[in-house]
Amino acid sequence: MSIRERHQPPATEGPLTFAVLVFPGFPMMAFSSVIEPLRAANVLAKRECYRWIIVGAAEGPVEASNGVVIQPGFFAENAPKVDRVVVCSGGDADHLVAEDAVGWIRRILRGGAHIGAVADAAFFLARAGLLDGHACTLHWTSQAAFTEAFPDIELRRDLYVIDRKRFTSAGGVGSLDMMLEIITSDYGAELAAGVAEWFVHSPLRSSVDRKLMPV
């Protein structure tokens, strides 16, 4: 029996839509670790469990940290309603200002969406007040600066943190671990295990299986 045959998800109401909000210099590994698990889940489930769109903070193409350029399908001012937003940005996230993007995210939140960040994008959410009262994590190289800038936000040195309608990862393959946890919550552990197997990333790790390197 193939892994496609073994991992069938429980019934749910239609596909869940993710929007990945990208900023110049976004880390491609974290970006791929968000989208590819969604694609694999659809393949293994043999149905559309997830949809996703790419959103730019402003009009025009966006260059990743490795030089790859992508053209977002939407921009913050015209992006549609989605179920979840994942902000993906690089090492300059502590300086990002994007009023249109913040306004769009706030509108999405009022509709009940979940909001997340990978790599250093927790800076962007924190600066916008979108992490107030929530725990989070981010890349270990930026944790000291984050604590200094936002001393009232609980920062955990974990692979990822899911706190009610907020989810953050420390970047890299930690983003994949976070997405596997989200897939588990949405469609069950069996499908998530199949996705992990698809990417030769087994067994499933919890958020605290491996603490992050201290700064």
Image: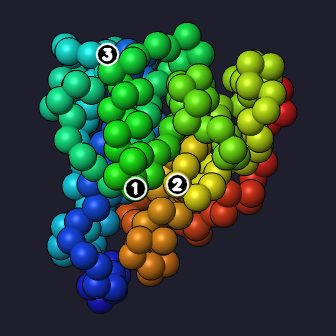
- Residue 112, labelled with which disc? 1
Q: What residue is at 33 percent from the left and 81 percent from the top?
A: 9
Pick out the residue farthest to the bottom.
1
- Closer to the N terminus: mark 1 or mark 2? 1
* Residue 50 tag number: none
Residue under circle 3? 63
Furthest residue toward front: 110
Residue 193 visible? The answer is: no
Q: Specify whether residue 206 is in view.
A: yes
Q: What residue type is labelled 2?
A: Lys
In primary-sequence order, the first of circles 1 and 3 is 3
Q: Name the residue under label 2.
A: 165
Q: What kind of residue is marked 3?
A: Glu
Report helix, strand or loop for mark 3. Answer: strand
**Left or right: 48 in relation to 164:** left
- x 27%, y 72%: residue: 44
Dot 3, crowdedness within 10 Å: few (<14), some or many (≥20)?
some
Q: Which residue is drawn at 27% across and 26% down?
A: 76
At mark 2, the secondary structure is loop
Q: Which of 3 and 192 is in front in this view?
A: 192
Query: Between disc 3 and disc 2, whose residue precedes?
Result: 3
Is the residue 71 above or below the residue 133 in the image? Answer: above
